Structures are given as structure tokens and as C-alpha cells.
Amino acid sequence: MDSPTELIHRSLDAFRIEIPSWGFADTGTRFGKFHQPAAAIDLDDKLADASHVHRLTGCCPTIAVHVLWDFTPGTDPGEVVRKAQALGIAIGSINPTLFQDQIYKWGSIASPDPAAREQAAAHLVDSVLLGQATGSRAVSLWIADGTNYPGQDSIRARKKRLEEVLEATHSHLAPGQVLLIEYKPFEPAFYQTDMADWGMAFLTAKKTGPQAKVLVDTGHHYLSQNIEQIVAWLLDEGMLGGFHFNDRRYADDDLTLGSIDPYQIFRIFHEIHLYAWENGGVYPEIEYMIDQSHNLKPKIEAMIQTVCTAQELYAKAALVDLPALARAQAECNVVDAEMILKKAFNTDVSAALESWRAARGLAPDPLQAHRASGYAGKAAAERTRRRQELGIVTLQSYA
Ligand code: AFD
Ligand code: MN
Ligand code: MN
């Protein structure tokens, strides 16, 4: 019987978390941005920051990129791949950008405007081909489409339009590539969102093709929704493609993972460990990715916090006594069953996390190591100088 530490170390050995390029750049809310001197300016900065986080945490070997934000026309994917490799990381998921452009005013792949659909379809194929050029497994697609008023457009016509484009996109996927379809109940559309919930994403992925799966963004659910039940159903159907990790108090707030409800994330991870336990210890191939770009916390500190929280909760969930849980469930012993989960959740795994890091030559506390490294101060000075040279004016001065 493995000790808790051995269980934790083995679970962490296979747990890789992808960090988003956009998490290092200045972003904000629709009410404005609060600029940070150390925020990344360009893809080189983002690669450097991601490499720094991976060096400190040891579990973030890939960086998710957003096509039009990171790969502007003329960017050579091969050069980006080489830069990433030189920094000890690799390019991870490719995130198409089917919003912001004026042509997408009525939607992208669901738009009634054929020109918008054509531009969006071409962008999706470009994203698939870019993923082949960077050696990325996943194209991770968030469809921002929807309508703002009853009667604005035909809901079923929109469904058919997007299905057609996604099926065409799927035909360009190389063997081994996956198309992850992300859902979100609202925003930027306020009356009806075309890919609004897990059911729509599931059905669409099934129709799109065998390499399409569902992406669960933990911030994209109504507050009362049982996310671990969605995860369990998708697991059981072999349709769980991956996660975008963040937390929310009210809506899609992109708060750092576990800052509001860590127990919910623990229960999600428990479903994954349970699934593997019932399948001979084989874990499904899931893309664990962070989707945050918090505008108050220092960018790199927030990223390290999320990575360490994800490791901690994944480790805790690995401690659930699954045989005992199965027995308690068979006896309908509700209290014992619940206490088996709570016992694992309440276990302090910090020593096991520290020994896992020590075995890899990593500092016991990545956040303290980051602060001691002076990395943020150097980045702030260098990037402030570059902003001045580039004439990038930030709306507010930042003390
Ligand atoms: C926003 C969207 C969605 C998407 C992310 C990156 O809500 O989560 O995955 O931006 O494009 O958070
Ligand atoms: Mn997301
Ligand atoms: Mn989101």
C-alpha cells in the first residue's frame, strides 16, 4: 500500500498544467485596465515569463497562445518554437481569436453574414495549420457568438451555421490533433449564446468529428451548477478534452483557481482520479490549462499561485480512499462516504509538495523563490524602458 507521500508524488509526476500567454499581459475588465510595469509587452516577454514559472514550479512545460494576439501576420512559427525550446518550454494549445474584429459584430461561425463566416472559417483552418507547425496537440476554441435580443436571429439557423464550419475545420486536423470546443453561458452576448453549455458543446463535438472534444472552463457555469457532475459525464463518454482553470464569485471573473471554492476543484479532480482507478490506473489524456489574466494581482505571482493551488488540490484528491468510498457507497453510508472525501480534502499536503519539489531541485515555495529572484523588478525596469522607447502610453500612471 503506497504511503500518502508516494501517492501524492506519483500523481504530481503526471500532472502538467499549461499556462496562458495572455495571463502575463496587461488586461482588465470592460471598465478599464490597471497597468503593471512588469506586464509582458510581446510574445518574447510571455515566453520568458512562462519559462520562469516553469523553472520554479517544474510542471508547466507548455504555454497556450492566442493566434492574433501572439502570432501576428508574418510571425514565423518555427522561430517561435525554437525560442520556446531555448527557454525550456514548448508551444501548447492554439487559441483562435473569433472576436474583436468588426466583421464579427453579428457573430463569427454562427453569423448570418457569409463574409464573417468565411473569415472565421479561414482563421480556424489557419489555427489548425499553425498548431501543426508548432507541434501543438490542441486547438482550443471559444465561440463568443450569440445574440442580444429576442428575435434578433434564428437560434436553429445559427446552430446549423456553426456546425457546418466546425465540421469543415475538423477535416483539416492532422492525426493526433484535437479540437476542443469551449462553452460559456453568456458574455459578450446577453440574450442567447450559441455555445452556451456543456450539452451544446457535447452534441456539437460529437457532430464535428472524432477528434473534437469538450473544454470545461471552470468559470463558465451558473453559480449553482454541479461542475464535477458535468466532468463525470464527459469522462464517462470519453469527451472531456480539457479545462480552463479559474474561479469566480459571480460570473466569468477569471479569479485565480481555488480563491473562492477550492473544494469544488478538489471534487472535479476526485472524479478524474476515480475514473482512472476504475480504468486500471490509466488516466485519460486531458489538457489541464489555466485561463486567467487577473488585473489586480501581480501577473507572475498570480500564475504561480494558480499552478501551486492546482497541484495542491490534485494531490489532495489523490488521497481519497477509493476502496473505502466504494464500500461506504455500497452500504449507502452517506456520512462515511462524505467524510472520506473531506478527510482527503482536509489533509495538509504541503510537506509532500515540498519533498516533490526538492526531488527535482526546486525551491520548496515557488512564490517565495520568485520574489527572491528579483525577476519581476528586472522585468518592470526593462519593460518600462521599452514602453517608453516604443511610445506605449499607459492610461494611468502606476506608482
Ligand atoms: C475569455 C473567455 C474564454 C476564453 C478566454 C481566452 O471567456 O474563457 O477561453 O477568454 O480566449 O476568458
Ligand atoms: Mn476559457
Ligand atoms: Mn472565460
Image (tube, helix red, strand yellow):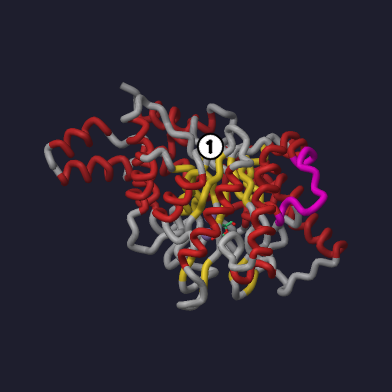
- Is 139 placed above or below 356 here? below
Q: Would residue 71 be counted in the magenta stretch? A: yes
Residue at figure coordinates x 76%, y 54% from the top left: 42
The amino acid pointed to by label 1 is Arg
Counting from the top left corner in percent of width and height, residue 282 is at: 41, 27
Residue at figure coordinates x 51%, y 42% from the top left: 209
Q: Mark 1 points at which residue?
A: 16
- Is 163 placed above or below 61 here? below
Using the rendered view, name the quadrant where residue 17 is placed.
top right
How crowded pointer 1 is (Cα within 10 Å; few <14, some 14-19, many 20+) is rated as some
Residues in magenta, as a range: 68-80
Q: Is 182 in front, or is 287?
A: 182
Relative to 292, 236 lies left or right: left
Relative to 367, 218 lies left or right: left
Counting from the top left corner in percent of width and height, residue 67 is at: 69, 52
- Is 83 placed above or below 218 here? above
Residue at figure coordinates x 58%, y 33% from the top left: 176
Instruction: Tell me the quadrant of the picture where the N terminus can be found.
Output: top left
Mark 1 Cβ and ligand 2 under 8 Å apart: no
Using the rendered view, name the quadrant where residue 369 is placed.
top right
Regarding mark 1 in the picture, which secondary structure is present there? loop
Counting from the top left corner in percent of width and height, residue 224 is at: 33, 62
Q: Would residue 394 be counted in the magenta stretch? A: no
Counting from the top left corner in percent of width and height, residue 105 is at: 63, 71
Q: Is 104 in front, or is 113?
A: 113
Q: Is 196 in front, or is 248?
A: 196
